[in-house]
Amino acid sequence: MVSSISLKNKMAAKISGVLIDLSGTIHVENTVMPGAIQALKRLRKTGVSVRFVTNTTKESKDTLLNRLNGLGFDIKSEEVFTSLTAARQVVKKRNLRPLLFLGSDASKDFHGIDVNNPNAVVVGLAPDCFSYDMLNKAFRLLLDGCPLIAVHKVRYYKRGDGLALGPGPFVTALEFASDVKAEVIGKPQPTFFAHALEEMKCDPQSTVMIGDDVRDDIGGAEAIGIKGFLVQTGKYREGDENRLEKPPFAVCKDFSAAVEQICTML
């Protein structure tokens, strides 16, 4: 399914770049979305610049890349920009010593960062860390004036056994208790998308974003002028396209359908 308004009439600028979400869009854990590998190959043949932008924080970039290529995709490290990468850049630039709410594998992306005597709280997706004692330790740091950094604030995501809580609810709990506003690093922040555009050397008007999260993928991208293609896979729930003030540029049944529409506009 695609938006009722003709895409040809809506497409003012030629597409030169495509941003692609990962989990829920081209795969869910170790399951490839039907036709996704072939669709990506087709998209690459058009010559457009491609970047994979993800809020995934349950595993390191290297582990994620190995997973994707092991599933049959052909993705290079420099093509992937994660919220963990962006968060590390912020921590390093500010000389912060974070209390990390990250799983052991995701923590690899913070290798070399001093975590002794924390002066900041960094929260990603870390189910094993969301205990009362850890949350209370973070709460006390925030009361002492330490900043709260959310790698992202996703409410929920899709995994193999169904929808699951993301880090957003836990970040919100810390904000509520401490009266400290979190600085969000990943999608839907404009700076996150801007970095990807800079790497591709594309402007917003000539770029599209394909994703399954209507708020963070589509809403975030369209807020800075990127055309959003919402796919009805992954975490998508019926009616999501109506949750934005302005509807997505296009709504497609899956990644393959989104690529099909994009290719007809090139």
Image (spheres, rainbow, N blue to C red):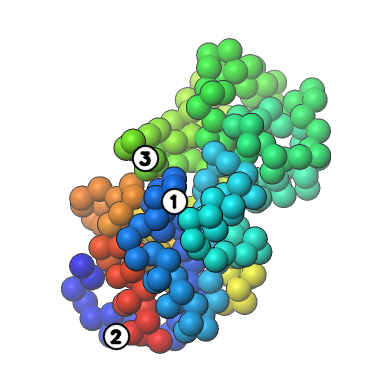
Split into 4 quadrants, where in the image is the N terminus?
Answer: bottom left
- Numbered tag placed on residue 8 in the rendering: 2
Q: Residues within 10 Å of mark 3 (few under 14, many from 20)?
A: few
Q: CA distance from mark 3 to mark 2?
A: 36 Å
Q: CA distance from mark 1 to mark 3?
A: 11 Å
Q: CA distance from mark 1 to mark 2?
A: 29 Å
Mark toward the viewer: 1 or 2: 1
In the figure, is residue 5 to the left or right of 177? left
Element under disc 1: loop
Cβ atoms under marks 1 and 2 closer than 8 Å:
no
Q: Is residue 141 above or below residue 29?
A: above
Mark toward the viewer: 3 or 2: 3
Q: Earlier in the sequence, mark 1 or mark 2?
A: 2
Asked whether the viewer can see residue 122, the reply is: no
**Residue 113 position by quadrant:** top right
Cβ atoms under marks 3 and 2 closer than 8 Å:
no
Instruction: Please give the name of the residue rendered at 60% of the width and 18% of the height, measured from the top-left corner.
Output: 134
**Residue 4 position by quadrant:** bottom left
| Residue type, numbered disc 1 | Ser
Instruction: Please give the name of the residue rendered at 30% of the width and 70% of the height, measured from the top-left corner.
Output: 257
Q: Residues within 10 Å of mark 2 (few under 14, many from 20)?
A: few
- Numbered tag placed on residue 23 in the rendering: 1
Element under disc 2: helix
> Which residue is identified by label 3?
160
Q: Is residue 206 above or below residue 245?
A: below
Q: Earlier in the sequence, mark 3 or mark 2?
A: 2
Q: Where residue 248 sits: x, y (%)?
A: 31, 64
